[in-house]
Image (tube, helix red, strand yellow):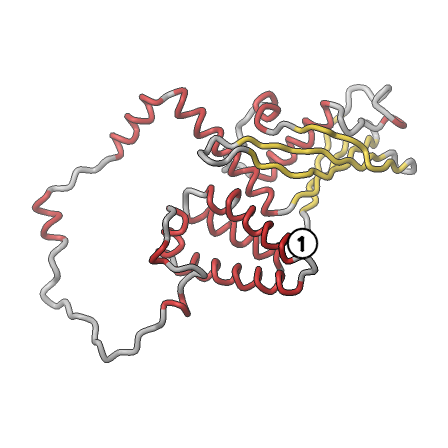
Amino acid sequence: MKKLVLSSAFLLPVLVGCGKAGAPECGDEMTLDLVRSIIQRELGAGSAAANLSEEQLRSLLPISLAHPTSFDEKISRYSCQADLTVPFNNPGQDVYKLRLEYTSQAVNGQHLAEVQVLPGDLIGIGAAISSNVRSQARAAAPAAAAAIEESQAVEVDPAYDSAMSTKADDYQEPNSDEPLVEASSTGPSFDCGNASSAVEQMICADPDLARLDKQTAEAFGVVRARSMDPGAVTASQGRWRRTVRDVCDDEACIQQAYQARLAELN
């Protein structure tokens, strides 16, 4: 699975005393802030993380156990690892946790950093942040949220609703002699009759999402069959489903989750 390599640079006010040959160390706060800012940037301007302050990012993206794995003296660059633990505010979900790989380097007065992350992990991080932001917004202004929902509600005239539900004069029942397309050939990998979650119901209602689900299931089957550790592949698929796909609340998020997972499996 290919990881995205994300990079950014900040000006360094002072280089003296920042580790070997002036390179900011893996666990320095400026290094961790730069790593968080790179993740924030890559999540995009439309994400819940877009307008978060540096202090809010520190709270929502806690990084621990940062340590160097190597140091390249020729270019004065640390290769680092750390644990990123993003808390969820959804029932039944605690945290989204992954091992971060990144570099820290000082070049001509600039602090350079690169972060390696899987596309699926980027979506998982964004989903966890979105969960927190939504939860905080609900807690801070429940009355305002209720007012917005009430203002968006549209009353329907019962007479109009009844008229709209009546079949048109030229309505024709489907011809029973016409060949029917089997659901198994166009539907998702699971039985829509047993769809219990909102995400599964959205997949069943959208042919494009159903197709992506089936393609992902087929790609997963191929990877598992070829793997020396099929149990690990199965566990990874279950983790992706719980922490990435199933936290989505709209079709666009689900589509992005499937596309990223397909890229990883392929």
Describe residue 177's horizontal placement relative to residue 211 as left or right.
left
x, y (%) of residue 22?
86, 26
Residue 82 higher or lower than 177, as above or below = above
- Res 126 → quadrant: top right
Q: Residues within 10 Å of mark 1 (few under 14, many from 20)?
A: few
In depth, the one of 207 and 62 nearer the eye is 62
- Res 165 → quadrant: bottom left
Describe residue 258's horizontal placement relative to residue 31 as left or right.
left
Describe residue 190's horizontal placement relative to residue 68 as left or right.
left
x, y (%) of residue 45?
53, 36
Residue 11 higher or lower than 77, as above or below = above
Q: Mark 1 falls on what kind of element?
A: loop
Residue at the far bottom in the pictured view: 177
x, y (%) of residue 91?
44, 34
Quadrant (top left, top right, bottom left, bottom right) of the C terminus:
bottom right
In depth, the one of 194 and 7 nearer the eye is 194
**Disc 1 designates what residue?**
1
Total tally of numbered discs in the picture: 1
Q: Residue at coordinates 52% horizontally, 35% vertically from top-left? A: 128
Quadrant (top left, top right, bottom left, bottom right) of the N terminus:
bottom right
Amino acid of disc 1? Met
Residue 120 higher or lower than 228, as above or below = above
Q: Residue at coordinates 75% horizontally, 36% vertically from top-left? A: 81
Residue at the far right in the pictured view: 74
Q: Residue at coordinates 85% horizontally, 24% vertically from top-left? A: 19
x, y (%) of residue 42?
60, 39
